[in-house]
Amino acid sequence: MTQPLIAVAGAASKQGRSVVDSLLADGGFRVRALTRSPQSELAQSWVKRGAEVVSADDLAAAFHGANGVFLMTPPTPPNNSQEYATGCLMADAAVAAGVRHIVFSTLENVDERTKGMKFAPHFTDKARIADYIRRLPVQSSFVMIAFFFTNLMEYYLPRWENDKLLIPIYLPEDFRAPFADPLSITGPAVLDIFKRPQDYDGVTVPLVGDWISPREMVETFTRLTGIPAEYRNAYTREGLLHYFPEFAANELLVQELLGMVQYAVEYGYFSPANRPEHITPDALNWEAFLRRTGWKGEKAEF
């Protein structure tokens, strides 16, 4: 019997790579990876493992013959964001191609939960896309991932000062928030959804590797690496722009970064309906993530 075919949009993203790797490792599905760089070293490594790699520019062709698709939309700058339109376009293309099951990576509707008090369009747009998908004639399931550990390695970089590593973090020092490693947590969850679709029809699966405060993150970092480090505030406007003055060039981006974290602190990252009771099984916590990556404060590319 022919194995089901799963198409993975955004295959080169952190979430997408995790899904492709999990599906290939499982061996129970044919995998079609959508990317804008089919000749890249990463894409060709998937080909060697048995995946089909296609251009993401032609969605009709990319989704043709697929039983299921994993969709994710990378956040776009809040100035004239096209994220909602892009997500709906992808979902429509999947349905038109005859796909039977869409798994979408979503977030909470911040605008709705805060009654417009907090500005976080890349959260809200994903929630609106999920609502759109729910109205389509297709089975749908959703994953909702916590704050990424990798944010500190890509966007909120530490810096050295007087023989100490200062780690600016976008949350209050003692506020415990949900975090996860998107590279290792996404794929196993999506794989389980595609293997047991009847158990996940219409379901949103929250994914969390750790509930941890910035203070605990910095203390764990120092304990594991031996590097003296200190927390610095990037939660307030003043703190954010002190450590990352380049953000000031885009006021809407500043508003979004602040709105996102203020929302998480004041309302909770997950709504009551989606807040998980437990850590995701086998997910990396912060300590395990540091041990796996060997990160010591340098910028990382993914």
Image (cartoon, grey):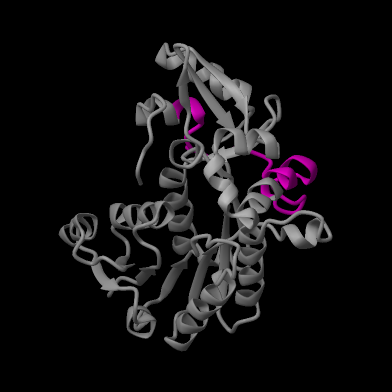
Where does the image place residue 182, in percent across and percent down from the top left? Answer: 46, 46
Magenta segment, prevailing SS (helix, strand or loop): loop
Residue 245 in sight in this render: yes
Where does the image place residue 56, in percent across and percent down from the top left? Answer: 34, 73
Where does the image place residue 47, in percent across and percent down from the top left? Answer: 19, 62
In the image, residue 254 sits, relative to residue 77, either above or below, namely: above
Where does the image place residue 256, in percent across and percent down from the top left? Answer: 65, 53
Asked whether residue 125 is drawn in magenta, I would say no
Asked whether residue 284 is drawn in magenta, I would say yes
At x 40%, y 64%, the residue is: 10
Q: Please identify the quarter of the rendering in which residue 147 is found.
A: top right
At x 24%, y 69%, the residue is: 52
Single out the residue that lies furthest toward the left.
Answer: 48
Tell me where the magenta segment starts and ends, as one range: 260-288
Single out the residue that lies furthest toward the bottom.
Answer: 96
In the image, residue 19 sits, relative to residue 202, either above or below, namely: above
